[in-house]
Amino acid sequence: MTLPTAKLGRTGLQASRLGYGAMEMRGPQAWGRPIGDDEARTVLNTVLDLGVNLIDTSPDYGDAEEHIGRWISHRRDEFLLASKCGCPLAADGDPRTVPPHVYTRANVRACAEQSLRRMRTDHLDILMVHMSPSVAVMQAEDTIAEMLALQDEGAIRFTGMSGNLPHLPEHIAIGAFDVFLLPYSALDRSHEELISAAAAAGAGTIAHGSIARPLMAPPEAMPEPARRPLADRHARLAAANLDDLADGASTMELLLRFILTHQDLHSLIVGSTQVTHVQANVAAAQKGPLPMDVYDALRDRLSMYEFRVGTRP
């Protein structure tokens, strides 16, 4: 079996339905265990060897961009590369905090140019605005104008938004972004209809789903805004006890295939620093969407426990 692909909306890019998220390669700034050079080389080359052709990263993912440039830049024609802008140019500081993002034209360009240098490439396939600023902020800073200038120069091919509520509807409405990266999983369906809205507008849709993190309690080093919802999802997942729905599959596989069942979703990024996890993710993605009876039962089960467990204050 081969890894299925889908067209990312009007971009025409054919992306593997499973992509790789490089945030786990943050190195010393990681929320989990750091990853060494040998591990990074092995994981990234395994990702490509298994047919994953979409890699998502960011300037503020610590060592991730350096690893991509060092270990797979010689295979650049094998994958689509997406990064972010608006980020601080250095990833120093306390990993439990979320550093402020700046959306000026100067910082947009500086982020893109730094990413190109780090990853040893002459273009990014997608440059996304990070951390979902409002349209008003981007208009005041000429954020999109600078992205279009970079596109005209050939430094980027398409524009994107790494977005979420409350600003995502207006991001879709302005029609400026070719691709949307947004949160979606069986444990967080708050953006489910927005995936369809983005696809209906002609954009590519990519989900980041926190598939693995709910399987265990989140580490204390994780920034509090991210840790709380993951802790809630971990509690809900444990309470739902999905073993009777699995039919021998792992919970990870159920959650991954649930996301791929969304008819308007083009790709899903999942990160890992372990080859065995990458292999398991690819094997799950090769199976495609869940049978609808399993999908409906999983959705209903987790919705029921959402009300019982609730959201932590």
Image: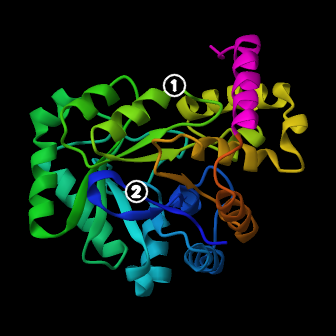
Quadrant, the C terminus: top right
Q: Is residue 145 magenta?
A: no
| Residue type at tag 2 | Ser
Disc 2 secondary structure class = loop
- Which residue lies at the image location 71% right of the left edge and 71% below the top edge? 275
Residue 100 showing in the rendered view: no
- Which residue lies at the image location 22% right of the left edge and 30% below the top edge? 173
Q: Is residue 126 above or below residue 247?
A: below
Q: Dot 1: few (<14), some (14–19), or many (≥20) neighbours within 10 Å? A: few
Which of disc 2 and disc 1 is earlier in sequence? 2
| Residue type at tag 1 | Ser
Q: Is residue 283 above or below residue 88?
A: below
Q: Main secondary structure of the magenta part?
A: helix
Q: Which residue is mark 2?
A: 58
Residue 23 showing in the rendered view: yes
Q: Is residue 295 left or right of residue 10?
A: right
- At which x and y percent is residue 159? 24, 52
Q: Is residue 312 magenta?
A: yes
User: So how many labels did they put on this image?
Assistant: 2
Q: In the image, which residues are magenta?
A: 292-313
- Which residue lies at the image location 24% right of the left edge and 58% below the top edge? 158
> In 3D space, how far apart are the residues under numbered discs 1 and 2 (Cα atoms)?
24 Å
- At which x and y percent is residue 282? 66, 64
In the current view of this chain or complex, which residue is farthest to the front?
292
Q: Is residue 7 above or below residue 173?
A: below
Q: Residue 118 versus residue 202: which sits nearer the camera?
A: 202
Q: Which mark is residue 190?
A: 1
Q: Residue 161 versus residue 260: which sits nearer the camera?
A: 260
